[in-house]
Amino acid sequence: MPYGVTPEMVEAYGKVIFDLSLNVQLRRGDPVRKLDHRTWLAEREATGLCDDEISDRVGLARPQVTFIRNVIERRVFRTNQYRKLYRLGGGKRYRPDEYVDPEEAYRVKPDAALIRRSLAFDQARVQAYVASGAWTAATLVSRIADHARERPQDTAVFCDDERLSWSGLNDRAQTAAAALAGAGVGRGDAVGLAAPASVAALIACAAIWRLGCPVLLMPRGSSDHALAEIAHKGRLAAIVAAGSDGRSAAAAAKPAAIPVIDLAVLEPDGLHNAEPTRLASAVAGDPAILLAGPAAGPTADDPDKLHVVAHTHHTVLAGARALVAALSPRLGAGAGAAMRWDGAIDDAGLESVLAYWLERGAALGLCDGPGGAPGGDGVPMRFAPGEGPPGTVPLTVTGPGGADVALMGTRAAPFALMRDGGRSPSDGGWRGVGETECRIAAGDAERPDTLGKLEVRGASTAAALVDDPISSTKIFLPGGWVGLGLAAVATDDGDLVISG
Amino acid sequence: MAKPGAGQAARDPKRDTKSDAGRERAASGEAAALADPDAVKRDLKDYALTRGAAAIGFADVDLIEKFAPPGHGPRDLLPRARTVISVGVTGPTQGTWRTPAKVMTSIGTNVSRIYRVAAGLAFRIESAFGHRAIYCPPHVDPELGARHPMQSLKLHAELAGIGARSLAGDILLHPEFGMLYYGSIFTEMALPPDGPMAENPCPAPSCVSLYRKSGQTPCMQNCPVECISGSIDDDGEIEEMRFDMFRCAEMCQQYENMPTIIERAFETGDVLEREELLYGGEAQSFFYKATAGVDTNAQCFECMRVCPIATQGPQVDPLRRGALKRGEGRPGDGEG
């Protein structure tokens, strides 16, 4: 109890002492300069008093006044205000509504932090990916901006008769991001998307990424219970929904009271009140895509079990770059060749296709028509869901010349394996895409000539399941290896034969 | 070089560091002091200006005591003080005014120059004129905390006529030199006071115009913590000035920073939060400044950066002053 001052005295006298002190100064006119002592005396209290004078006014001892004043000053003192200076600098006018403290700009909510905690990459692998250039500063958002700059009028996405250029996509994504932020989506919040495949849905994806948020494409036609479980496990902070998907989204959102945002809010007509977003833009280490479903095949875990895996801009773009390098020579797909997704929006694998699309900068056909086939006949490159063992995500890619490539991965390792031709999954010929390493683990020993568990690692593999450490240890292994949950054997020439 | 006089021949040349010319000036100055206080003022003014001061003024101690808070008058420090001398050095260079805030906070101040001039003047008064003098401590009262100075250098300068209170938190402005850094000297020697300025240069006409349009002056608009507000009357003079010093202190003083950081580090249960508080880039920078004693903890010049008096007064600009001295006219003349 310094100087006999109690906490109650600090509370009782703090405000009056603070207001009387030099901390708040109010001067009327110019009495000192004019030597107008009488006016100065009358205004004395407002100009701020010294502690001795305050002591006389409030009837406390001077040391008590000093102590209370210093305590109150400390309480109202805000650290890090000079950040405003550093960011404004150079005499720019300060506008409180335009300034965002950097700590605030990158702050995420606890659920978003939980998703981030699953990005527990092996540090040696991170070093390797950064050193090799597999992980760069590029994001899905920056790729859109790149294309908008380099080929502004080229078609970015088309659906039936609707087309949107890269510059249009970039602009619409910016304003839609502002609208999302205005609707309460914060940086890093996981956002579910429940909407038909459309140009508007892709704009929503881009807007979600712009806010540093991961998007989770909600499976359509799932039960309300399943959707609610996905929403819970994906730690969704909001669901963007449209049309009939809106009702399902509402059912998914209800148990956790997740806000449902109408996709129409992001349409130009709904953007009247969209202010430029003040949230920091996405960085490559942010989670970009959440994949819900089994994370691996049957040998690793229960293939029916619902997992959520977070992929960052790093991992999805690393996978996409490797895929571009691998597919172009095989399929003869040039830089400008259009591509289309022949699946539905909720078919597993679309997320990988989106990353590939943004990395390549091709025009993407995506539509929720019959069979998911978009308009635009003669699109030379087509992606479609394939066949594969439970828990895997198989894709088939057909090139302009009719040649095709099969891709297979899991939600934990989406861009893992490929082979030429669309034979049965159990046929051989699988190899790791790009720099993806593959190994066969049999028991504790690694014996490449023995049937064993297929494990991969590479710049596109995830690090852990969201909020599920026990299951994570079954799939995500030391050294950055990821179990695909498949049994396989390696042939003499290094190809893999998958036995399911 | 003048030959030493008879009385000087016996002095040890190794111990006598004062030049003959200096001794002669001192002797003539002391003589002048006895006869002509104005001559003393001229001598002290010459001394100060030669050493880098831009302005010097003299104030009557009785007048300052009348306005100073109890316990904070010159005679609380020097009981027989009769004159307060206020000196000011100019603010930053024109280049500095144009630097980003990070640079400005580091190199904007000129306080070291004023210390040299003010301390020198105190010695000059004692050695040349035989009167006690002190260099007024510019720092805080050691019993009252970080925001309580021992003396108001502002009050001294205002009553000595080398600054007038501005809308920008009462920062003194000089019509010729703009924003000055001030120092004070108290002496027992009686010297004629100069008196306050007849006119206050603040607000400048352009600031009045802006105020009429927007309700704010540039200094109000540009304060990052919005610590300045006020009003201008119909005659274009300051009607009311409100200064939330506690907000300004968050930028300029930050004395609470270190204990606040340590206290929060103790309180937080989050390891990374603690590491950011103690070892984050901004924390390290702060601890570096605080422990190494470099610069000040922080400075903020945003109100002065946009002040036309502080940055564009007739003698504020060293570039212009230099050009005039060199007979080159005003820099920029003839340029588009």
Image (tube, coloured by chain):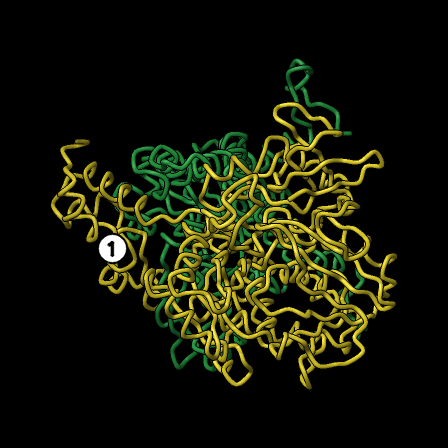
Q: Is residue B117 visible?
A: no
**Quarter in which the C terminus of chain A is drawn:** top right
- In the rendered image, residue B128, in percent from the top left (x then y), is placed at 54, 33
**Label 1 sits on residue:** A19
- Quadrant position of residue A356: bottom right
- The green one among the chains is B
What residue lies at 75% left-to-right and 40% top-to-bottom?
A496
What residue lies at 59% left-to-right and 38% top-to-bottom?
A121
- In the rendered image, residue B222, in percent from the top left (x then y), is placed at 50, 64
Examine the rendered structure and indicate whether residue A243 appears above or below residue B332.
below
- Quadrant position of residue A431: top right
Please, what secondary structure does the residue beneath circle 1 have? helix
**Quarter in which the N terminus of chain A is drawn:** top left
Q: Amino acid at mark 1?
A: Asp
Q: Chain of mark 1?
A: A
- The yellow one among the chains is A
- In the rendered image, residue B107, in percent from the top left (x then y), is placed at 61, 46
On the rendered structure, is B311 left or right of A362? left
Q: Is residue B205 visible?
A: yes
Examine the rendered structure and indicate whether residue B29 appears above or below residue B162.
above
- Front in this rendered view, residue A200 or A444: A444
- Front in this rendered view, residue B317 or A448: A448
How many numbered callouts?
1
- Front in this rendered view, residue A295 or A15: A295
